[in-house]
């Protein structure tokens, strides 16, 4: 297995674990850990896609990571305003 495959597998594994935990109601969709797992997993998968120059997945994972980053930011700022 090449390095880029290992990196991509780690990123996808984090995303799938987050999905599993959310599907079985172990982690809420709004929990910071769930959002953080999506951010980290997508960022790692994006990097792996960049390494193999597969632009459609670079875009997909970059947008996924950006949305997760915005959600994480909002989770901190929304709580602070209460």
Image: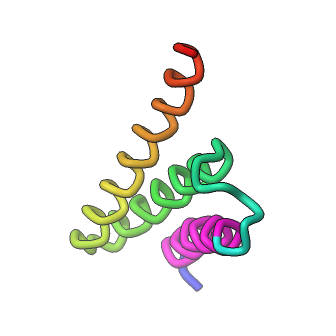
Residue 7 magenta-drawn?
Answer: yes
Predominant SS along the magenta part: helix
Examine the rendered structure and indicate whether residue 27 appears above or below residue 3.
Answer: above
- In the rendering, at what x and y percent does residue 39 appear? 51, 50
Q: Toward the viewer: 75 or 1? A: 75
Q: Please state if 36 lies on the left or on the right of 49 as rendered.
A: right
Q: Relative to 40, is 22 above or below?
A: below
Q: Farthest front residue? A: 82
**Residue 66 vertical position relative to residue 29 in the rendered view, above or below:** above
Residue 50: quarter of image? bottom left
- Across and down, in percent, residue 48 comes to 44, 66
Q: Quadrant of residue 80?
A: top right
Of residues 66 and 77, the one drawn nearer to the viewer in this rendering = 77
Give the percent coordinates (x, y) of residue 37: 61, 54
- The chosen color scheme is rainbow
Quadrant of the frame with the N terminus: bottom right
Q: Is residue 34 magenta?
A: no
Left or right of 72, for residue 66: left
Q: From the image, which quarter does the C terminus lie in? A: top right
In this image, 20 relative to 50: left or right?
right
Residue at (66, 55) in percent of width and height? 28
Which span is picked out in magenta? 4-22
Name the residue: 41% across, 51% down. 65
């Amino acid at each position: 297995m090449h390095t880029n495959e290992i990196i991509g597998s780690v990123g996808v594994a984090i995303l799938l674990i987050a999905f599993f935990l959310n599907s079985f109601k172990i982690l809420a969709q709004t929990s910071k850990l769930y959002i953080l797992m999506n951010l980290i997993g997508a960022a790692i998968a994006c990097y792996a896609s960049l390494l193999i120059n597969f632009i459609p997945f670079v875009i997909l994972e970059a947008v996924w990571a950006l949305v997760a980053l915005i959600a994480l930011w909002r989770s901190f700022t929304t709580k602070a305003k209460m």
